[in-house]
Amino acid sequence: MQLILMRHGEAEAPMDSSLHSDASRVLTGRGQQQAASTAQQLIQRYQPDLFVVSPLIRAQQTRQAFDAYCTDIPVIIYPHIKPDDKAVPALDWLSQLDAKCIVVVCHMNIVAYLGGLLVGESPRSFELAEARVYEQAVIAPGLSVEQARLVP
């Protein structure tokens, strides 16, 4: 089974205003290009059968880059993979999913913590729109092997 962790593309800078929240940040033009590049590389090499996506707009927009290549893959919006969420409960939840190739689109810092948990190492930062591919028999801490990194 494959689990692919992907960070969203470049997003607008946070605004110092009570009218704008981190959740409403959108991808820049560059971020859209980054997402499209990684989506294309990923689809050429792997066959995802499920997307799990953060509810924040920039992650949703990053996942939408896959629509150019595949539109029939189910999408689950999971509210507990936002930047400051805890990785252990998220990984436990992911381990319950029935799919052969899951693509998770989320954010720093949680994506780094999820990756670290999978391979039993310290968290390592992801580039914008970077995807890392992990292979494992079951999703559990320390049982995965990182197979590839896709960077736009």
Image (tube, helix red, strand yellow):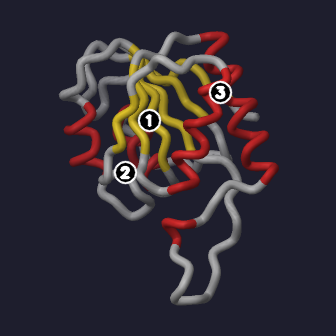
* Pointer 1 residue: 104
Q: Looking at the picture, does residue 58 appear above or below residue 76?
A: below
User: Residue 108 location in percent, x, y?
Assistant: 52, 55
Where is residue 28, by image quadrant? bottom right
As drawn, is 30 to the left or to the right of 128?
right
**Other residues around mark 2 within 10 Å, as few (<14) / some (14–19) / many (≥20):** many
Residue appearing at x 58%, y 50% in the figure: 125
> Going 55% across and 30% down the picture, which residue do you hit?
132
* Badge 3 element: helix
Q: Amino acid at mark 3?
A: Ala
Q: Which residue is rendered at x = 39% and y = 35% of the image? A: 52
Quarter of the figure with residue 90: top left
* Left or right: residue 113 compared with residue 30: left
Quarter of the figure that contains the N terminus: top left
Secondary structure of the residue carrying tag 1 is: strand
Q: Between disc 2 and disc 1, whose residue precedes?
A: 2
Q: Within 10 Å of the Cα at label 3, are there few (<14), some (14-19), or many (20+) other Cα atoms?
A: many
- Classify residue 20 as left or right of residue 86: right
Mark 2 and 1 residues: CB-CB less than 8 Å, in contact?
A: yes
Q: Earlier in the sequence, mark 3 or mark 2?
A: 3
Task: Identify residue type, mark 1.
Answer: Val
Residue 39's disc number: 3
Q: Foreground: 143 or 100?
A: 100
